[in-house]
Every structure is written in structure tokens, then in C-alpha cells.
Amino acid sequence: MPFITRTQGSCMRPLLAMTVLLTAPLFAASGVQAAPEQAGLSFEHNDWTLACDNTRTCRAAGYQDDYGKSEPVSVLLTRLGGPDQPVTAKLKIGDYENHTAVPSPRLRINGKDLGPVADADGGDLTASQTAELLKSLRQNSTILVTSADKRQWQISDRGASAVLLKMDEFQGRLGTPGALAKPGKRNEASVPAALPMPVIRRVSWPTTRPEDTALASSASLRAALLAAQAADDCNVLAGLPPYDDEAPVPISVQRLSKDKLLASAVCWRGAYNEGVGYWVINAKAPYAPVLVTTGASDAADGEISMAQKGRGLGDCWVVKAWVWDGRRFQQSLDQTTGMCRLVTAG
């Protein structure tokens, strides 16, 4: 099934989008499509942020001014790659602490009433509201959501023009009629087509053998893992301060194939996150560790995953995943939930 994230509020989609298929245990990869040349893009300026993935889909999110008086609010703009693609917009009133209904929300831009907002809890703006919003983001504007009980929320325009320009550039729209920042007369048909989502065939892990479990206590394996990257990238495993007085962190070993194993150990600890390192190693010495990541959170059959808070409040997250295809781990997910602006918990 495809990896997706919630589209509610300012949740940003992946920089890397993949479809993962599950297969029975294999010792060789099969049916794996090569990833496209297009890489993702992440960009942030003032109160706006952008994430474009490897299918050429882009998502931009704007928020309240972090230093202003507005309560949390965000808008999410989404545009697929390819010619003649529309922009869709979703609005989200912040509900980090208490979710209370917003009576009769309306969108107002530069003093003009653009009508009711169907759903202030992550609902779509109309096509006409979206068009007015995009027009306003090219210049200094006052973008408000108001309610019948006299509350209001202001979406900042600071950074929007830079983000929209980056979106146009990434999607190859600069100078075309459909460009958001700098439209022109270049033929719309010249816009690069959207790319298909790559496919990774996930291979289940075989049963770990007794000798694999015994290898976890090997001093030579520990030394090989430490030598595979800088010690301060994995200071818990290395026993560096402030962990030098602790007992050596345990290593775990999982079988991947007839000649490959997955070794793991805690690499670092923070105030509200912990990073686990994962290495693909040979089943016998020399182990020749190949690092997958030092920031993982968990691993299950065929997949390593990471979910890390951007700060202790938990209003922003980074999520990643790597899938075993029988030969190596391929990154299948790289996403962020957007800026840390108290829009919603988790």
C-alpha cells in the first residue's frame, strides 16, 4: 500500500513517495523498479514551508506569524506535477490544546469577504477562494479567517512568494501561464510530466538463528560497528560522555538473508527522542557494516522506521522508513508534518 500522511491542516506529504509490495522471504531482489532521477525538495522561508516529492507533486504550507498575535492556523496548498494541474487548498484552525467548533468561519482577504469556509478543521477551500488566495500571496496581503463569535486567525504572507517560486521552479512551470509566482507565455505543454511512484518489493525477514543471537555479544562486531562511522554519531554505543559511566549498550542482531544480518544498537538519546542505529553486516567476519541510519525508532518485518519529534510539544514530526528488498534497504518514506506552530498535536 502507498505511504501517505494526513492531509488535514498543514501536514506535509513525503519528499520521497513509494509504493511497497510485500513478498515472501527471498535471498535476491525481484521486481524492483529503479527510482526516478528526480529528487525531492524541502524549502522553508519565514512562515511558509515547501515539500516536493519524487513524483513532482508539491505541497506548501503557510502559518500564522510566529511572533504575532494570531492563534494557530495553517493552509496547505497541493499541486501535482505535469501541465494544466490545478492547485488545491485546505484550511486548518489550530486545535493543539482544546478543540472547539468555529461558528460560521469565513475567509477574508484584504478586506474582501470571500464567503464561508466549509470546514475549518482541515477542509477544502473552493476553487474561487483558492484563486484569490494564490493571487494575494504574490504581494503583501492580509489573509484572515473570521468567525461568528468575533474571533479571527491570520495566515501570514511572509515567505509565500519565495515558496511559490521554488514550487514553480521544481515543477518546471516558470514562465508558463500556470506559474504561481512568475507567469508568462511559455507553452504549458512544456511543463514536465508527473513521474510514476516507484515500487519497492519488500522482502520478509527469515527466522533469526541461535548463532545470530550469540553474535550480538561479540567484541569484534561492536568494534566494527563503532569503526563504521564517527563515534559522536553514535555516542551511546561508543560510551562517550555522558554515557561513559553506563554499562555497554546491548547490540541486537536479526537475520536478513543467507549471508546478511541486521545489527542494531541505541546511538543517541535526547530530551524527547532516541535514535537507534541499524547496520547491514556480513553473517561472518569481516562484518563490513553498511549504515542504514542512526536515527531509527523501530524495526519490524522488512522495514526500519523513524518518528522523531521536532520539539517536546509534539506539534511537529519527522518520519522516515527504509524497506529491505532482499539486497539492501531502500528509503521508502521521508516526510515532515510541517512547521512547529501548535496547529495540532502529533
Image (spheres, rainbow, N blue to C red):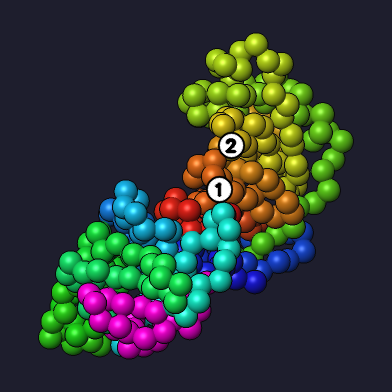
Circles 2 and 1, Cβ within 8 Å, touching? The answer is: yes
Residue at the image position 65 percent from the left and 71 percent from the top? 1
Q: CA distance from mark 2 to mark 1?
A: 9 Å
Looking at the rendered image, the quarter that the C terminus falls into is: bottom right
Precedes in sequence: disc 2 or disc 1: 2
Q: Amino acid at mark 2?
A: Tyr
The boundaries of the magenta stretch are: 106-131
Tell me where residue 306 appears, x and y as whole percent: 59, 48
Q: In the depicted view, which residue is nearer to us: 152 or 310?
A: 152
Question: From this viewpoint, which residue is outermost toward the right?
Answer: 210
Q: In the depicted view, which residue is nearer to us: 104 or 274?
A: 104
Callout 2: SS: loop
Q: Which residue is mark 1?
A: 314
Indicate which disc residue 272 carries: 2
In this picture, is 170 found above or below 80?
above
Q: Is residue 307 left or right of residue 178?
A: right
Q: Is residue 37 visible?
A: no
Q: Is residue 116 left or right of residue 213?
A: left
Tell me where residue 154 appears, x and y as whole percent: 34, 64
Residue at the image position 28 percent from the left and 53 percent from the top? 46
Question: From this viewpoint, which residue is outermost toward the left?
Answer: 185
Tell me where residue 111 appears, x and y as whole percent: 24, 77
